Image (cartoon, coloured by chain):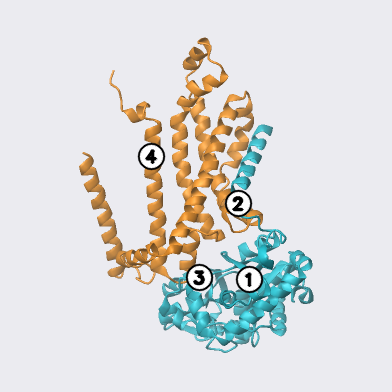
């Protein structure tokens, strides 16, 4: 079964690449604006042998990792606080719903004004965008708490901290993991966007330079890199999720009763 | 509610704290001074041919011999540079002259310190041109009436200068439809007929020409002979607090400009270090002029055009703005 999937996946990718090669070659789109796959691959090879490319990749990953770490920690801590403290959830709900849909990109002028075109601007945007993903999932996760389990824990004399640790946290964890996976993807998007628009060092800035320089194949090569990065991050996030939830039925598989 | 606010503040603080670890506090001029009597200044620039003299001057030591170390930071366009300079993230920045005048008329405290680039002043051989597709019926700027013309930013230097070209050719600029489009997208848009004409600058201009597009007018030449297009600037606060540093930056940049102007091949070479312009395109690129001094008469011409096109809230004060 797994083998079939891999073959299907590879075939799909091959067809996609062949299309990418054929469409410009047949003149359906102009080669000057959409170079065939082979030329993009060539440009990608040049990029990979360039030291400054690896520095840019490092900058992007730094922005992504720092931003995600801050967003996830803040999201979890604030999410648990908001849910546990009485009335706080009701009091903050409308504010959260107001702040959450504000596109992070709209904060670019603020970020530039505060931090110029450096890492801190990127972090501001990344944290703002990915924080909500985690927070909302944490809130939903805790809402899902089984009252019977909670009451049972209470009657066994578990204290506040122990209930958070042994009842609340395991209930919320699957949601938190979903939040982290979403946040990881959003963080990457925002890192590249911030670099592209503000010019902070990284892959995004490199794409912008290629674009300004009329270096079309290089531009697509860098875009492919961001795509691959997204793929790696998604696979990584799923692995982490599976590991952390190895005990959970969604991962363990259905147990027939 | 208050809890949430505290939480958000904590997030912001966290962000700041995390970031502080990775970058040495820039911003304050005192903070940027470093050992050995050299001062590092951050300059916000756009990764285009225009700023080649700074890279060249840095390589030739024109800045280090005056105790200056340049930290050239690439930004995407003036939209990121002006706020960066005003808030002290950059000590200097690169911007076109009209943007600086617009900023000043909006009471944004900017002060131009030294020349940036100038037009070549030669019709047919400038770094900026109005171009049309191969075999287009549009033959002159007058024919642009009723047509769709792309400029990179509306209500700025390129729109006013294109309007002047239309005016000089005997046309009515109000009959031209201007659309905003990034320079790098203009060749494709022109080629596919989405726009009738485009005001492009290098290196997009070289791409348009290589596709068989033709130049019909040279707006910067129409504005004034030897038109000063862009300058390096700082904030008025920084200029007042650090007159010595500004003077050193001025002198070193002027020397770099003169050197780049006299050694175009070296300038072309250094462009490859910070852009990705393909070698065959770069060879065809028309370089701008890099005179050491800004041409005040041309800036006055730009000011008049800006006024007649309604760009300014109040008349910019050139005595205060220019060095």
Disc 3 target residue? B274
Of all chains, the one bearing label 2 is A
Which of marks 1 and 3 precedes in the sequence? 1
Q: Are marks 4 and 1 on the same chain?
A: no
Residue at the disc numbered 1: B94
Whether label 3 touches label 4, CB < 8 Å: no
Specify the quadrant of the image occupied by residue A93: top right
At label 1, counting other C-alpha atoms closer than 10 Å, the crowd grade (few under 14, some 14-19, many 20 or more) is many
Task: Please tell me which of labels 4 and 2 falls first in the chain.
Answer: 2
Crowd band around label 2 with a 10 angstrom C-alpha radius: few (<14), some (14–19), many (20+): some
Q: Secondary structure at mark 2?
A: helix
Query: Can you tell which of label 3 and label 1 is closer to the viewer?
Result: 3
Nearest to the observer: residue B86 or residue B180: B86
> Relative to the observer, which residue lies in front, B72 or A203?
B72
- Mark 3, secondary structure of its residue: helix
Q: CA distance from mark 3 to mark 2?
A: 28 Å
Q: Residues within 10 Å of mark 4 (few under 14, many from 20)?
A: some
Q: How far is disc 2 from disc 1 in space, using C-alphas?
A: 23 Å
Residue that appears at 40% across and 52% down: A229
Whether A133 is drawn above or below A25: the answer is above
Residue A111 location, x and y as percent? 62, 53
Q: Secondary structure at mark 4?
A: helix
């Amino acid at each position: 079964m797994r083998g079939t999937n891999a073959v299907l996946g590879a075939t799909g990718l091959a067809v996609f690449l062949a299309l990418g090669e054929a469409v410009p070659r047949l003149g359906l789109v102009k080669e000057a604006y959409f170079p065939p796959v082979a030329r993009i691959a060539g440009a990608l090879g040049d990029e990979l042998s360039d030291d400054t490319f690896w520095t840019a990749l490092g900058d992007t990953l730094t922005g992504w990792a720092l931003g995600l770490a801050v967003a996830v920690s803040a999201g979890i801590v604030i999410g648990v606080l908001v849910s546990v403290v009485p009335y706080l959830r009701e009091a903050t709900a409308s504010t959260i719903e107001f702040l959450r849909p504000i596109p992070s990109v709209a904060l670019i002028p603020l970020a530039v004004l505060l931090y110029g075109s450096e890492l801190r601007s990127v972090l501001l945007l990344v944290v703002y965008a990915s924080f909500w993903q985690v927070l909302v999932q944490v809130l939903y996760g805790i809402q899902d708490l089984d009252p019977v389990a909670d009451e049972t824990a209470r009657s066994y004399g578990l204290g506040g901290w122990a209930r958070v640790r042994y009842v609340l946290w395991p209930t919320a964890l699957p949601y938190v993991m979903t939040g982290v996976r979403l946040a990881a993807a959003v963080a990457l998007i925002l890192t590249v966007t911030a670099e592209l628009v503000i010019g902070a060092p990284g892959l995004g800035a490199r794409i912008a330079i290629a674009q300004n320089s009329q270096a079309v194949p290089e531009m697509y090569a860098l875009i492919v890199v961001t795509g691959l990065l997204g793929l790696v991050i998604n696979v990584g996030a799923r692995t982490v999720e599976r590991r952390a939830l190895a005990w959970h039925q969604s991962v363990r598989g259905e147990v027939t009763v | 509610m208050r809890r949430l606010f505290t939480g958000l503040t904590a997030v912001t603080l966290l962000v700041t704290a995390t970031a502080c670890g990775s970058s040495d506090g820039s911003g304050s001029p005192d903070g940027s001074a470093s050992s050995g009597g050299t001062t590092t200044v951050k300059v916000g620039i756009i990764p285009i041919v225009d700023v080649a003299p700074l890279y060249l001057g840095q390589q030739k030591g024109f800045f280090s011999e005056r105790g200056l170390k340049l930290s050239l930071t690439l930004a995407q366009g003036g939209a990121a540079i002006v706020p960066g300079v005003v808030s002290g993230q950059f000590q200097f920045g690169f911007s076109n002259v009209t943007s600086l005048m617009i900023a000043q008329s909006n009471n944004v405290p900017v002060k131009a310190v030294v020349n940036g680039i100038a037009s070549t002043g030669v019709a047919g051989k400038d770094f900026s041109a109005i171009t049309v597709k191969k075999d287009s019926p549009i033959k002159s700027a007058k024919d642009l009436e009723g047509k769709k013309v792309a400029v990179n930013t509306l209500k700025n230097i390129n729109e006013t200068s294109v309007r002047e070209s239309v005016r000089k050719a005997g046309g009515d600029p109000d009959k031209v439809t201007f659309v905003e489009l990034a320079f790098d997208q203009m060749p494709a848009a022109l080629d596919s007929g989405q726009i009738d004409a485009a005001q492009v600058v290098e290196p997009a201009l070289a791409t348009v020409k290589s596709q068989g597009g033709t130049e019909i007018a040279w707006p910067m030449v129409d504005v004034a002979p030897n038109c000063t297009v862009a300058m390096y600037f700082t904030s008025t606060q920084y200029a007042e607090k650090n007159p010595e540093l500004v003077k050193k930056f001025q002198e070193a940049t002027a020397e770099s400009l003169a050197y780049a102007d006299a050694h175009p091949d070296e300038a072309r070479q250094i462009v490859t270090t910070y852009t990705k312009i393909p070698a065959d395109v770069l060879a065809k690129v028309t370089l701008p002029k890099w005179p050491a001094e800004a041409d005040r008469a041309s800036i006055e011409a730009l000011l008049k055009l800006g006024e007649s096109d309604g760009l300014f809230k109040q008349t910019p004060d050139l005595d205060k703005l220019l060095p």
